[in-house]
Image (cartoon, rainbow, N blue to C red):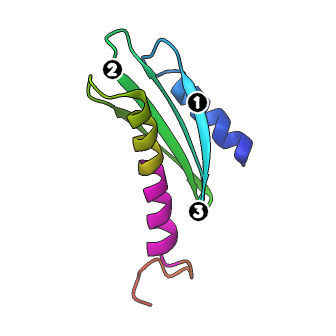
Amino acid sequence: METRSVDGLERVARNLPVKSLTMDRVETKYGPVRFGYGQDGAGIFHGIYAVQLGEKDIARTLEFKPDTKEGDVQVMLLMEGGSLLKHFYEDTPMNGDAGNGI
């Protein structure tokens, strides 16, 4: 499943309106957060992060303010992906009832 996730993220990231693309992967307590980002011709950063929630891969694109620094882009992508993973694994019932009150 790792290969499918990376291939999908790369395919989407390659369509971001950026001159050059940086991709990375950071392992968290709940699983990996994969992300890619770059700057467009106007200097605005565009990014995407992807996480695996159970059997599903979830990705989200973001566009940053013009004065955002590269290090801040990396941190925000990682924090967004990490908080989604944390929310899923800590706040979602894993016993199959999916919060139906059963």
Residue 102 placement: quadrant: bottom left
What secondary structure is marked by label 3?
Answer: loop
Front in this rendered view, residue 97 or 24: 24
Q: Position of residue 15 (x, y in %)?
A: 49, 21
Instruction: Of the two numbered discs 3 and 2 on the same chain, state the one appearing first in sequence.
Output: 3
Tell me what residue is drawn at x 64 percent, y 42 percent.
5
Label 3 neighbour load within 10 Å: few <14, some 14-19, many 20+:
some
Q: Amino acid at mark 1?
A: Met
Q: Amino acid at mark 2?
A: Ile
Task: Determine the main secondary structure of the stretch shown in magenta.
Answer: helix
- For the record, the magenta segment spans 80-93
Residue tagged by mark 3?
30
Tell me what residue is drawn at x 57 percent, y 82 percent.
95
Residue tagged by mark 1?
23
Instruction: Of the two numbered discs 1 and 3 on the same chain, state the one appearing first in sequence.
Output: 1
What secondary structure is marked by label 2?
Answer: loop
